[in-house]
Image: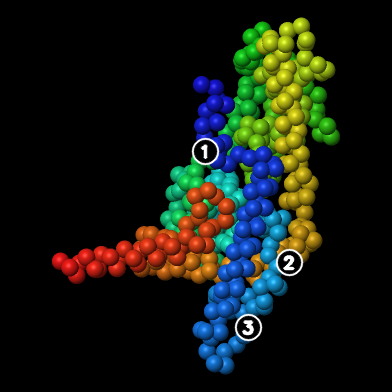
Amino acid sequence: MLEDDIYRTSTQYRLWSFTKESLNSIRENTNSLASVRVRDAIRRAQEARPATSTPGGSDEPDSKTNTPAGPESEIECLTPEDELELVQYYCEKTLELGDEYKPPLPTTVRATAIQYLRRFYVTNSPMTYHPKSIMPCALFLATKTDNYYMSLRSFAEKIPNTTAEDIIAPEFLLTQGLRFAFDIRHPFRGLEGGVMELTAIAKGEGAPGPHHPEQTAAKLQEAIQAIPPAEGAAPSASITDRIASAHGKTRQILKTAAQMTDAYFLYTPSQIWLSALLLVDQPLLEFYLDTKLGPAPSGSPPASAPESALAMLFALRAKLTGVLESCSTLLGTYLNTHDPNVPPDPARMKNLKRIGKKLYHCQNPEKFSELSAGRTQRREGSGSTTPALLPTAGGGDVDETEGPAVKKRKLEKEAEEAGNGGNK
C-alpha cells in the first residue's frame, strides 16, 4: 500500500480536509446559525428577566449570566472574519501557555491542541462557546492524546483564575466537536525524514531515488555541493551547515505559520513541510524534489510517449509545484504580518478589543449556563454531560432544541416507571 493510500484512510483526510471554498462555506453557515440562535436565546433571557427580577433590582447587564441588555435588533453578532481572528488569537495564546510549564510542553502537544481548537471552531461559533473556556481544555486533552502525562492539578496551576473543574468541564463537548477524531498528522516527522536524507547525501551516503536508479551516492553528493545559495542568503560554510540552518528555520515555520493558518485543512503534512522549506531555501527544495521526481519540467511533456513513466513524473512534478507555491503563499502571508521579533501590531490589538466587546454582548447566555451546569455535575460526582451540550451529528453549530426534547423523554420515562411500580 502506498503512503498516499494510508493517509487517505486517516480521519484527518476523511473528516478534516477541505477545499478553500467548502471550508469558507461551512464557517459562514456556522456563523449564520449561531447568530440566529444567539438572538433567540438573548430574547428568551430578556423575556424571562422581568418574571425573575426582584423589585428595585438593577437593569444593568448581569455579568454572571452574560445576558446583554437592549432589544434584539441592537444585537450585533460576530462575522465569520471576526470569529476566525479571535480563534487565531487563542491559538497564539496556546503556544504561549505551553511555555509556562517546566519543562515547556513539547511542540507536538501544543500543535495538537491548536488543531483541536481550530477544528472545533469550524462547526462551533465563539458566540456559542467562548475560546477562553475551550483553549485550556484542548491543551490538556492534547497532553493525553499525545501521551505526555500531566496531572490535572499541576496543569491547572499555571492558568490564572482557573480551577481544575473549569478546565475539564467542556471536555466531552470538545471531543464531540472533534467528531472523536484525536489523531493529528503533523508535518514535523516528514521534515525530520527529509533532513536526514539531505544530510546523508551531503555525507556521500545518499541512496538513489525510486525513479532514478542511475544515481549514485557520489553523483548526488557532487550535485548537492553545487546547489546555488538561496536568494538573499549568504553562502554557508558547508552544505551540512546550510541543511541545519534550513532545518531550524523550516521547523519554526511549522510551529507558527502552519498552526495559525488553514494549512492543515487544505494540504497534506508532506505538502506543508515542503512548502515551508520552499520559503526558507528554494534551491535546496528543488534539489530534493529532483532526487525523487527528476528535474523540474520546462515546457510541455513529451508528446511521443504520453503514457510513459517520464510523462507521469512530468505531470506530477508540475502539479506538485503549483500546490507547494499555493501553500507557501499561505504560510508566507502569515509570516509577513506576524513577525515574532517585532511588537504586536497596534491596529490588530485594537481590532481584537473591538471583537471582544462585540462578543461580550452576543455571547449565548444559555450555553454559558450549560457550561456552569457541567462544572456542577462534576462536583456532584456525575460522569455524564447534560444533553443540551450535545452537538448535532451532522456538524454545524450546536442544536438548541435537543436538550429539552431529551429531558422531556426522560421525565416521561420516569413517570411511566413510577406508574408501573405502583401497580406491583
Q: Does residue 381 lie above or below 267 as drawn?
A: below
Is 282 located above or below residue 54 in the figure? above
Residue beneath the point at 62% across and 85% down = 59
Q: Tell me which numbered mark, 3 or 1, is placed earlier along the sequence.
A: 1
x and y, in percent, of residue 206 in the image: 63, 17
Instruction: Report the residue at 60% width, 39% height from top.
Output: 17
Question: Which residue type does callout 1 highlight?
Answer: Thr
Q: Where in the figure is residue 337, as x and y percent of width and height? A: 78, 50
In the rendered image, the residue lying farthest to the left is: 424
Question: Mark 2: which amino acid?
Answer: Arg
Residue 274 versus residue 381: which sits nearer the camera? 381
- Where is residue 256 drawn, in percent x and y? 67, 46
Rounded to the nearest angstrom, the CA distance separating label 3 from label 1 is 47 Å
Q: Secondary structure at mark 3?
A: loop
Give neighbour class at mark 1: few <14, some 14-19, many 20+ (Cα, 10 Å): some
Residue drawn where x is 57% and y is 52% of the image: 396
Tell me if label 1 and label 2 are in contact, CB under 8 Å: no
Residue at the limit of the structure toward the bottom, as seen here: 56
Q: Amino acid at mark 3?
A: Glu
Identify the mark nearer the N-term, 3 or 2.
3
Q: Is residue 339 left or right of residue 36?
A: right
- Which residue, given by chain and number where applicable, does mark 3 sit on? 60
Reading the image, the residue beneath label 2 is: 354
Q: CB of mark 3 within 8 Å of CB of mark 2?
A: no
The disc placed on residue 11 is: 1
Identify the secondary structure beneath mark 2: helix
